Image: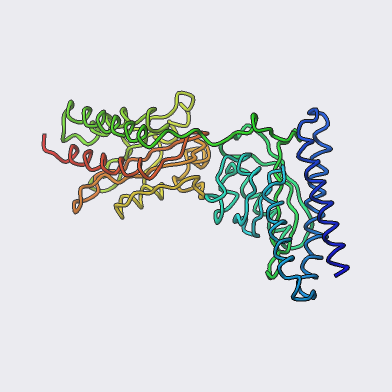
Amino acid sequence: MAQTDEFGEELADFVRRVAELKAARSVPADDLPTVLDAAIFELDHVAGQLWPRYESLSSTGPSGVASVDRQEQQLLKTLFQRVPVPVALVDRETVVRRLNLAATSFTGVRAGYATGRPLTGFLAHADRAAFRSQAAAVARGEGDRSLTVHLQQQPAVPVRATLTALRPSGEPRTAVLVVLQPADSRVPSPERVPGPVPTLTETTRHAALMDLVDAMTTALLSGPVGDPSGVLERAAGVLHGRFADWVVADVAGAARLSRTTVLAPSDSVEGARGVAAQDPAACPLVVEAARGGSTALPVRPEDPDAFGRDTSGAPILVRANVTSLLCVPLTTAPGPVQGVLTLFRSGARRAFSMAEAQAMDMMSRHLSLAMSTPR
């Protein structure tokens, strides 16, 4: 019981220090690096001292303190969630197991969405391989690591990621605790944290989709039908800008797919030329859509080569900073696929939703009818 009392006193002291760290967020910016160092030290103290002592007490202590142990375990979980530093717990493959509240605000990703997905999916493509390698090294017991990465939604802002090993109770494999902070060592205040893109109400979203469907229908009915390239060009003009940053259209010919339309942001002229010169057969997503006739909706696509490479050898998804895409086959079942329409959203723009994918699926059938109707 004396050991339990000593542990409780040490835990209470830790809670008080965390409260002081929370209050220290208002100190001048030049003093914040010291506060961050103290916060990381406290996290390391929990991982290296408090947690092993808790495991020892829970395995050897009398059954009468079981309820107290459960309360202390819950307290540790609460501390993880409330500590004012962005922290994530991942496995050696960087799959997120836990994300605290500060990390959800810092990354703009909800904890429920992030759990079970690789943390590398929220980083810029160029940083993913290095982060995976460092996380694996930490999990193997090769020591703590630190590296600079970039969040995909804010690629211009460097983020310092500090990785340390942690062995959760009762688990055979080592996990990795990841602490994120801006590279300038400033703790992000709520006013400065880049949060999720504000969402509209469901009614407003539905109205916007109906406006898009109306504009598409008007474009298809006001022009000639039976000309696949012309139909796709008109459709691309409706979708470009208001619905997608990039629009790529491929027509299925007698022998192979041919690229007919590429619309890109105004600052991506060279990138658009590279996409236009690409062979659609070198785009795995396009080929799969043409063969299987099913829509693909990857958010933060993990494979940088999913849409192939441009003439310079650079992955198109990386060069265009694609954060979400829709690859839609143009078909009216049970007929053949007449083409494939691919839409990119990049940067901080909100990812395609399931409702938007459903609306695009409906428009794809209208497009297929307009392409196949005799002139």
Q: Identify whether 327 is placed above or below 177.
A: above
Q: Quadrant of the C terminus?
A: top left
Q: Which residue is situated farthest in the front direction here?
A: 64
Percent position of residue 44, x then y: 80, 53
Along the line of sight, the residue nearer the viewer: 331 or 2: 2
Q: What quarter of the picture does the N terminus occupy?
A: bottom right
In the rendered view, would you say 257 is above or below 227? below
Of all residues, the one furthest to the left in this rendering is: 374
- Tell whether 225 sits left or right of 329: left
Tally of marks: 0
Q: How is the image coloured?
A: rainbow
Residue at 83 percent of width and 32 percent of height? 31
Q: In this orientation, which residue lies closer to the viewer: 53 or 116?
A: 53
36 relative to 124 in the view: left or right: right
> Residue 267 at what x, y percent from top left?
49, 24
Residue 150 screen position, x and y as percent: 64, 39
